[in-house]
């Protein structure tokens, strides 16, 4: 039985009216793989579109707040807090499918943590925050390098709700 389709086949929003409002959190992460040139340009603050990390941080927070406008049937939630952190990963990494012998790959990691007291969780808000932040980095850096790759968007942990707590091992 689907939670988003009624017995007549109509799309519906999950009814949470009978659930108690409880404290809930979610934390998600993702990365955008970048070349050494992109990483150095961001660090030096020389990207032509401006301060990449600050703009992406703001965009991620705004994205988390606008999740129900982007994901069909998500409940609009009052967020108690939303933090979006971006960190440069300067050690070479090898992404799945990347030719690590010919290209040193660096990354920018985005982590979004969202909190609310409500009848439903904030996993989608955390995942959307990460996604929008990384898409913003892509948009601001694509003029320098079109081979940027967004990868590894995933839920790290969540607390509260009927399904209980989750923590990625």
Image (cartoon, grey):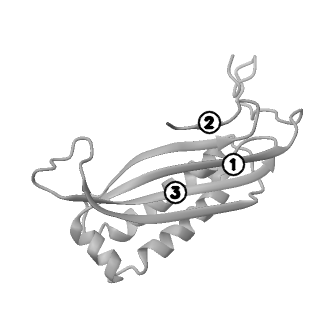
Residue that appears at 54% across and 66% down: 59
| Gap between marks 1 and 3 measured at Cα | 13 Å
Q: Secondary structure at mark 1?
A: strand
| Gap between marks 3 and 2 measured at Cα | 16 Å
Residue that appears at 67% across and 50% down: 68
Q: Position of residue 70 (x, y in %)?
A: 60, 50
Q: Secondary structure at mark 3?
A: strand
Quarter residue 4 falls in: top right
Q: Which mark is residue 25?
A: 1
Name the N-terminal-most of marks 1 and 2.
1
Regarding residue 68, the answer to whether it shows in the image is: yes
**Which of the two marks, 3 or 2, is nearer to us in this view?**
2
Return the residue found at the far front.
169
Q: Secondary structure at mark 2?
A: strand
Relative to residue 91, is residue 121 depicted above or below?
Answer: above
Q: Closer to the camera, 73 or 77?
A: 77
């Amino acid at each position: 039985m689907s939670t988003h389709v009624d017995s007549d086949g109509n799309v519906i929003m999950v009814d949470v009216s009978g659930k108690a409002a409880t404290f809930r959190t979610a934390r998600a992460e993702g990365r955008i793989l970048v070349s050494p040139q992109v990483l150095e340009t961001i660090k030096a603050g020389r990207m032509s579109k401006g301060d990449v990390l600050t703009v992406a941080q703001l965009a991620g927070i705004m994205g988390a707040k606008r999740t129900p406008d982007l994901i069909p049937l998500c409940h609009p939630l009052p967020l108690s807090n939303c933090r979006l952190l971006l960190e440069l990963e300067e050690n070479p990494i090898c992404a799945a499918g990347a030719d690590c012998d010919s290209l040193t790959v660096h990354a920018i990691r985005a982590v979004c943590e969202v909190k609310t007291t409500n009848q439903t969780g904030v996993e989608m808000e955390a995942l959307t925050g990460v996604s929008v932040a990384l898409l913003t980095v892509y948009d601001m850096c694509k003029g320098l390098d079109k081979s940027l790759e967004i990868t590894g968007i995933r839920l790290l942990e969540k607390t509260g709700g009927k399904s209980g707590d989750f923590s990625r091992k």
